[in-house]
Image (cartoon, rainbow, N blue to C red):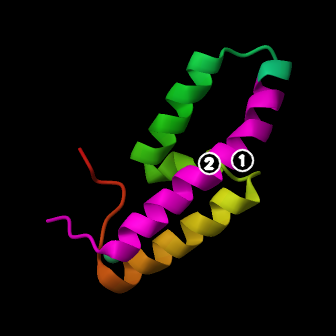
Amino acid sequence: MIRKCSECTDLLNELVSAMQSDGERLKESWIASGHDLVELREKMLASIANDESIESFTASSSRTAEVKRKMAEHQAQTGHSFFNLR
Ligand SMILES: [Zn+2]
């Protein structure tokens, strides 16, 4: 089963904050390339739900990548899972 601790909560909050910050840059280039913001939001939500796509989707965002590294580390050390929330 999924177990969580206060560090999990901190890391998730950090991720959201990092994605918002990186998302501003992402949003600008996304609009510039003629895409729809609704589509972008769906992609971001999907990338949170599916850790396989996170890697490619946020590859260009260093802050998000850093938080993700910490999450992966925490997950490996504790067995806590961030992405199996369904
Ligand atoms: Zn934890």
Within 10 angstroms of label 1, few (less than 14), some, or many (20 or more) residues?
Answer: some
Residue that numbered label 2 is attached to: 19
- The front one of 8 and 62 is 8
Q: Identify the image quadrant of the C terminus.
A: top left
- The front one of 21 and 60 is 21
SS type, badge 2:
helix
Point out the stretch of residues depicted in magenta.
1-30
Residue that numbered label 1 is attached to: 22
Left or right? Give the position of 37 relative to 14.
right
Whether residue 21 is visible here, answered yes or no, is yes
Query: Is there a contact, CB below 8 Å, between mark 1 and mark 2?
Result: yes
Q: In this view, does 23 lie above or below 1?
A: above
Q: Is residue 40 above or below residue 24?
A: above
Q: Is residue 17 above or below residue 34?
A: below
Q: Identify the image quadrant of the N terminus.
A: bottom left
Whether residue 55 is visible here, answered yes or no, is no
Q: Is the magenta stretch mostly helix, strand or loop?
A: helix
